[in-house]
Amino acid sequence: MRRIAMSPRLVTPSLVIAAILCCSSTARAQDPEPAPPKNLEFALSAHGHVQTFTYPDRGPDNWVDAIVGMEAEIVRYKRTYFLLRFENETDMGHIDEARGPFDPNRGRWTFGVSSRTEFKSVFFEGILRHDCFHGIDRWFPGQDYKMTSFGVGFGSLGYLQKYRYASDGDAGSSVSFPFRPQYYLSPTFYYPRGDPWQRIPYVIRVAADARLDLLRWSRLGLGLETINVFYYGDVHEVQRSHALNFDVYIYGNGAALLLYAGWWPYDNQIFRNRDGKVVGGLEISF
């Protein structure tokens, strides 16, 4: 039998490229399509912040405060997440004693569960939480508070901690002015009344917060934030707290370091009253 040899001249680069493309197309055609997302799954993800700030006019009740907060998504059903929340605030004053200048004197602890449904640009949540605020290793008469509340909250999707820095990083060398307002509004009710559930003079609490990104350049950013809380009490009086922060951001990948200055222009509520106080702080947010 006569063998037919293929001349090397017939094996051109075009034939080689065509063979490779044909093989890769066949391999892609055989790849299975990605499975659709499950309706029910364990999300098991967490986001939070670690924050500390100091008062220039230090005293026995205020010098350095620290806040650690976290929310953990446990289960997701379609667009709804079931979460656990925890936050701790420690307030430290200044003392002149041999054991050191720092005196942790008051603390606040918050435990909560919630269900949150996320839509295209907004979210809605139901909230159940318990707060307590009292002295640390000491008793302050009339300042031992307990609060159990339920309520709702809604706002823009970008306000949530999980999306706050989700797509950030190095934005390039050009300066931009995003002016992206984000907001959150939450009315809650203190119920049931009486011990051991409540030890406060309030019936209703309304939180109204907003953030505005002003400027962005590479990994640096500037923004404003306002934090407002309104309380309606047993004596049919509204007490309130208003805070304004000027933020400098150093963006990472999904997280940020914040340097900020804060001011409470008005505050007449009973929990850690900071009326007229000015602070400078640092926050790691993720």
Image (cartoon, helix red, strand yellow):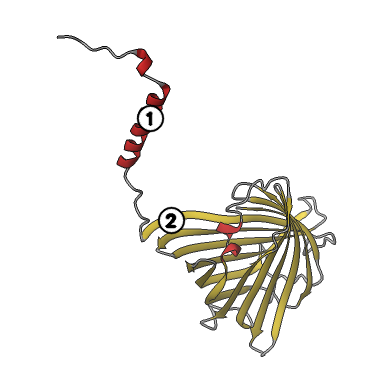
**Crowding near pointer 2: few (<14 within 10 Å), some, many (20+)?**
some
Q: Position of residue 186 (x, y in %)?
A: 58, 75
Q: Position of residue 18 (x, y in %)?
A: 38, 30
* Position of residue 233 in the picture relative to residue 3 (left or right): right
Residue occupying the point 69% across, 75% down: 141
In this view of the protein, which residue sits in the foreground, 65 or 210?
Answer: 210
Kind of residue sitting beneath label 2:
Ala
> Element under label 2?
strand
User: Considering only order in the chain, which callout, 2 or 1, is on the residue closer to the N terminus?
Assistant: 1
Kind of residue sitting beneath label 1:
Ala
Residue occupying the point 75% across, 63% down: 245
**Crowding near pointer 1: few (<14 within 10 Å), some, many (20+)?**
few
* Position of residue 52 in the picture relative to residue 159 (left or right): right
Instruction: In the displayed orientation, state which residue is furthest to the left.
Output: 1
Rendered view: 168 above or below 140: above
Task: Please give the label number shown on residue 51.
Answer: none
Q: Quadrant of residue 233?
A: bottom right
Instruction: In the displayed orientation, state which residue is furthest to the bottom.
Output: 236
Task: Please give the label number shown on residue 43.
Answer: 2
> Element under label 1?
helix
Q: Quadrant of the N terminus?
A: top left
Residue occupying the point 77% across, 50% down: 100
Rendered view: 215 above or below 4: below
Task: Please give the label number shown on residue 18.
Answer: 1
Rendered view: 48 above or below 126: above
Alpha carbon distance from label 1 to label 2: 45 Å
Q: Position of residue 106 (x, y in %)?
A: 69, 64
* Position of residue 123 in the picture relative to residue 243 (left or right): left
